[in-house]
Amino acid sequence: NESFCIRDSTNNVNAFTMTHTTGYATFAGGGTFGGELNVRPATAGAARLNITAHDPNDAKIGFGDTGSGTWWNLGVDYDAGRTSYDDYRFQLTDMNDDDGVFIDHGDTAWSADASDERKKDNWEMFENALDKINTLTKIGSYQRINPETKELIYGDKRIVGISANEVQKILPEAVRTTKGDYLTLCYQDVFVLMLKSIQELSSEVEKLKENA
């Protein structure tokens, strides 16, 4: 099943169409800005790459395995009320575009798509957060090294941070494992624990004021 077609606007194919089913490679036009490229094995649900650009507000690169549901879209947000190119949002989301991270034009940090309380359930509130924070001993700057050779990676450059190994003991949800079984840290999770510790500390201060 193969096809190749180029037609002008009077013949209604919208610029360009190419299909090859055996190896499954597709490129199809779709209007002035339209375009879609699919690259994947013939086996249904297997790993694939998908690039779409239906118009200037809808440009994405999708990659993953649709069969297992492990799929991510990387592209420009087209449905968040954007009115100009300066307002566009760059995002990395799941297959359904409802969970992931994004960064708005002019921002310097990523934000999560799933912060709305309507998407959350089964809350477990932190307790003794101040005591947990006080167990951390490595809060400062450090130098990156090769864990095997112990040689400095970035010369004399110092990096600010904390120890994922220490955090793992008090907030395991904030720690992930990477290649080589090394730990990495989600700092925004630690920030939430810090907020709770501030509340606890504030409560202690209020009690002291009442008893003064």
Image (cartoon, grey):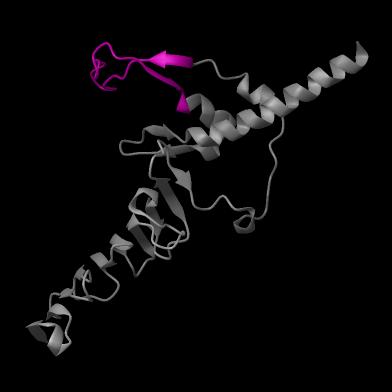
The part of the image, by quadrant, that contains residue 44 is bottom left
User: Which region shows up in magenta?
Assistant: 139-164
x 31%, y 19%: residue: 144
x 13%, y 75%: residue: 23
x 42%, y 49%: residue: 102
Relative to 168, say whether 115 is above or below.
Answer: below
Relative to 2, say whether 68 is above or below.
Answer: above
Q: Nearer the viewer, residue 47 or 194?
A: 194
> Where's residue 199, x and y in %?
72, 28
* Predominant SS along the magenta part: loop
Residue 31 placement, left or right of 10: right
> Where's residue 56, x and y in %?
28, 62
Give the position of the N terminus as an image quadrant: bottom left
Q: How many marks?
A: 0
> Where's residue 51, x and y in %?
24, 64
146 in the magenta segment: yes
Residue 118 seen anywhere in this rendered image of the structure: yes
x 73%, y 22%: residue: 201
Residue 8 placement, left or right of 40: left
Q: Residue furthest bottom?
A: 11
Q: Nearer the viewer, residue 68 or 2?
A: 2
Relative to 23, say whether 209 is above or below.
Answer: above
The part of the image, by quadrant, that contains residue 153 is top left
Q: Nearer the viewer, residue 102 or 181?
A: 102
> Where's residue 160, x and y in %?
42, 19
12 in the magenta segment: no
Residue 62 seen anywhere in this rendered image of the structure: no
Give the position of the C terminus as an image quadrant: top right
